[in-house]
Amino acid sequence: MPGPILRSLLAPWWAAQLLTGAKSFLDNPLIGSDRLNRRGLHAGRVKLAHAMAARRRAGLGRALDPADRAAFDRDGFVLKPDFLPPDAFARLRDQLFGWAGPAREMVQGDTITRRYAVDPELLGAVPAMRLFARDPRWQAIARYVASFDVEPLLYVQSILSHRRDAPPDPQTALHADTFHPTMKAWLFLEDVGPEDGPLTYVAGSHRLSPGRLAWERRRSLQVGEAADFLSARGSFRIGAEGLAELGLPPATAFAVPANTLVVADTFGFHARAASVRPTTRIELFAYSRRNPFLPLAGLDPWSLPGIAERRIPLLWLTHDIYRRWIGQPWAKVGRKRPGDE
Ligand SMILES: [Fe+2]
């Protein structure tokens, strides 16, 4: 924690962060304040963010297939098997798997995650990617679940499990990503078997029920003292007893065939199931997150064509340049194919 002079300089910044997606109980002493959270600061942010998301979603729901909308409102995710026409999917997979692009990798526990930006270079080498990126069904579902009319950040991602001698991957614990509705999506490029570390999701856990709100409030008073670093950074973990207490079912595992699209609100509890052996899962991965307190769904200059597909390289470059201050978990690893070791 900084000294008294720095603290007084930072105070207005910390206060301003309360009206953003800032979520770490460790980095912002107001968010982490027991005194304020007993008076309802965390619970209040959760409630307001959900109310704003519901308002924004109301305007975005018309573009959606009503069945997808009903599924999302009930479960917190939309699952679409056979998403792309078979020939389009085959072309996308063949072009992508044959391409060695500039990869970045991050290690978490024993698992390596490799990512490629879907940027102008990738779109040039893998033109079939546009068949997915521009699909109006994808566009509509992603925007509704995100609660924002913004172009999601799109990556190619390979997850290589059991590659390091280290404690298990922390993503295998059930958690909410943050305190407000937010979107993540996966188009699986290969079959995912039950043993391959599939994504899991607790159906219905995206809803802010009175029980969940009370749980959020309670957790906000405990995360500071627990040794659970990721919860304290604002991604609350939950165990089986917690789910039962909230009346939620056990997690559903998405052991699904290739060409299945899953779009989920990751305020809902989710995890990566532990894989029993070394596996490689290759997928398109997308996410969308904006300030959860914005009243309007649209007006995002970063979503404009020509800019949208340059956001990820720009983001990575910013972290490369300022790594001393903001960190850069994604290391350049040269050119690799998505399926390479
Ligand atoms: Fe997560």
Image (cartoon, rainbow, N blue to C red):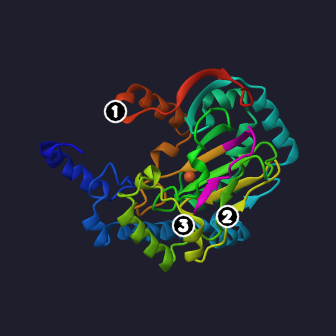
Q: Residue reaching furthest left?
A: 5
Tell me the residue that label 3 is attached to. 57
The magenta-colored residue range is 269-284
Please, what secondary structure does the residue beneath circle 3 have?
helix
Tell me the residue that label 1 is attached to. 325
The image quadrant that residue 254 belongs to is: bottom right
x, y percent for residue 185: 64, 51
x, y percent for residue 237: 51, 59
Which residue is found at the position 48% from the left and 70% from the top? 55
In this view, 117 is above or below 21? above
**Residue 119, label in figure:** none
Inter-mark Cα distance, 1 to 3? 35 Å
Callout in the foreground (3, 2): 2
* Residue type pointed to by label 2: Ala
In-image side of 158 versus 320 (left or right): right
Q: Are marks 2 and 1 in contact (CB under 8 Å)?
A: no
Tell me the residue that label 2 is attached to. 251
Which residue is found at the position 38% from the left and 70% from the top? 43
In-image side of 297 versus 174 (left or right): left
Callout in the foreground (1, 3): 1
Count of numbered circles on the image? 3
Tag 2 or tag 3, which sits nearer the N-term? 3
Dot 3, crowdedness within 10 Å: few (<14), some or many (≥20)? many
In this view, 254 is above or below 333? below
Tag 1 or tag 2, which sits nearer the N-term? 2
Q: Is mark 1 within 8 Å of ligand 1?
A: no
Inter-mark Cα distance, 3 to 2? 25 Å
